[in-house]
Image: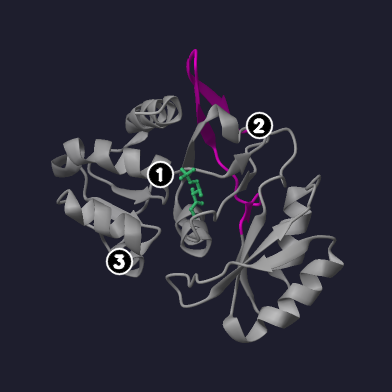
Amino acid sequence: MTPQDQLKLEVARAAMAYVVEGAVIGVGTGSTANFFIDELAALKGRIRGTVASSVKSAERLRGHGIEVLDLNDALERGWDIPVYVDGADEINRALHMIKGGGGALAREKIVAAVAQKFVCICDASKLVPVLGAFALPVEVLPMARAHVARELTKLGGTPRLREGFTTDNGNVILDIAGLSITDPPALETAINQITGVVTCGLFARRGADVLLLGTGGGVETHLAA
Ligand code: 5RP
């Protein structure tokens, strides 16, 4: 296991303390979330089930025999999602994030919106002073790709189509390079208002509540102000 994977494993284990027994658990996407899924397998008899933010995570959960529920079904049965555990591509001290490196940003944002607590699990390389070195993913309806790319260019970035990639929702992704995001909530709103955008990978209006950060010296817990 690489040292970075070791940190991902440690934060995934730390996130188990936030799992609420008997409840539906929101589960994210990516290599760090995969470590969490593998840890969750040990508790599968003690949770009601999970809601997954991607087809890939749903498959991994089912591979462990963990029940995956449809989000609409869960909510219509009156079941809350007390906690959502997911990684990030970048996170700042305000616990605003860039997500979507794995292309699951829209479903991640939906599950995060429903969850009462967002626990972000990251290795220390993800903590940055200013978001934007990681190209910001934007999920776009295919018909609107060129229009949205033009509008994003006006906001100061350089959008590039993620080649050969279709989201779980049948859409495309434009990754915007060259942004220095000093006001994440404002940029999130501006991008999300462009016609044809499904959502952008800025998670600032609904950021994380807790960051579990894997460092060489152990797992640090950071709370949103
Ligand atoms: C997927 C995501 C992931 O959370 C993000 O890409 C981090 O992934 P990893 O844990 O593999 O670094 O937003 O859409």
Residue at the spot of label 1: 31
Above or below, comparing residue 122 to residue 26 in the picture = above
Q: 136 and 18: which one is in front? A: 136
- Mark 2 or mark 1, whichever is nearer to me: 1
Classed neighbour count for the residue bearing mark 2: other residues with Cα under 10 Å, few (<14), some (14–19), many (≥20): few
Residue at the spot of label 3: 70
Residue at the spot of label 2: 225
- Mark 2 or mark 3, whichever is nearer to me: 3
Is residue 80 one of those drawn in magenta? no
Q: Does label 1 point to a residue whose CB lies under 8 Å from ligand 1?
A: yes
Image location of residue 13, percent across then percent down: 33, 28
The three-letter code of the residue at mark 2 reads Ala
Q: Residue furthest bottom?
A: 143
The three-letter code of the residue at mark 3 reads Asp
Is 136 on the left or on the right of 153, as rendered?
left
Could you tell me which residue is drawn at 67 percent across and 53 percent down?
135
Q: Quadrant of residue 197?
A: bottom right
Could you tell me which residue is drawn at 77 percent across and 62 percent down?
158
Classed neighbour count for the residue bearing mark 1: other residues with Cα under 10 Å, few (<14), some (14–19), many (≥20): some
- Alpha-carbon distance for marks 1 and 3? 22 Å
